[in-house]
Amino acid sequence: MKKLIMMAALIIATGLITGCSSVPKNSNMTGNWKYTFEETGRSGVQNGTMTIAQDSYNLRGKCNDLFGEFQLTGSMDENSSKFIIDGTRNDSTRSFHLNGSLSSDNAFEGTYTTNQNTSGTMKGSKVTGN
């Protein structure tokens, strides 16, 4: 009987430890990304690069594109692959807000708005390997 109780306690403890992870399931944005964005009402696609570090549900990093280098902060949704990222250019004159969703481990899509009254779509892919 004592062995049975010990076994049950071990199973419960293991379930609690593995079931209470603070990392979102299937949503890890840590890494280097390439992205493209298209502004609504304008022709042409712009390119940029992004580095993101994820700690639990929080995101931070930087991106660089035609409009400069931006510091990033954001968060992952706890129950889905959706995320938000806010970027502020280093001189604080430009900023953007991105609502996105991971479409796979290595790709995202989303829409953005800026403090310059522009908006558009953004797509990204994680840079893997060399």
Image (tube, rainbow, N blue to C red):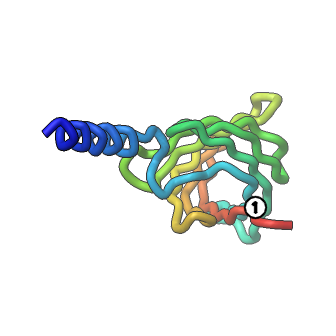
Residue at x 22% of width, y 41% of height: 3
Q: Which residue in the protein does label 1 denote?
A: 34
In the rendering, at what x and y percent does residue 59 appear? Answer: 60, 39
Residue 36 in view here: yes
Image height of 118 relative to 62, above or below: below
Rate crowding at label 1 as few (under 14), some (14 to 19) or many (20 or more) other CA atoms within 10 Å. some
Residue 2, picture quadrant: top left
**Farthest residue toward the top?**
92
Q: Residue at x 61, y 42 (%)?
A: 54
Task: Tell me, yes or no, if residue 95 can be seen here.
Answer: no
Query: Which quarter of the rendering shows the C terminus?
Result: bottom right
Instruction: Please indicate whether residue 130 sits to the left or right of residue 76 in the image.
Output: right
Quadrant in the picture for residue 44: bottom right
Q: Position of residue 21 (x, y in %)?
A: 43, 41
The amino acid type, in three-letter code, at marker 1 is Lys
Residue plotted at (62% across, 35% down): 73
Relative image position of residue 51 (x, y in whole percent) = 75, 47
Quick check: 127 above or below 93? below
Percent across and percent down for residue 98 are 57, 48
In the displayed structure image, the side of residue 67 where residue 85 appears, left or right: left
Seen from the viewer's position, the closer of residues 15 and 95 is: 15
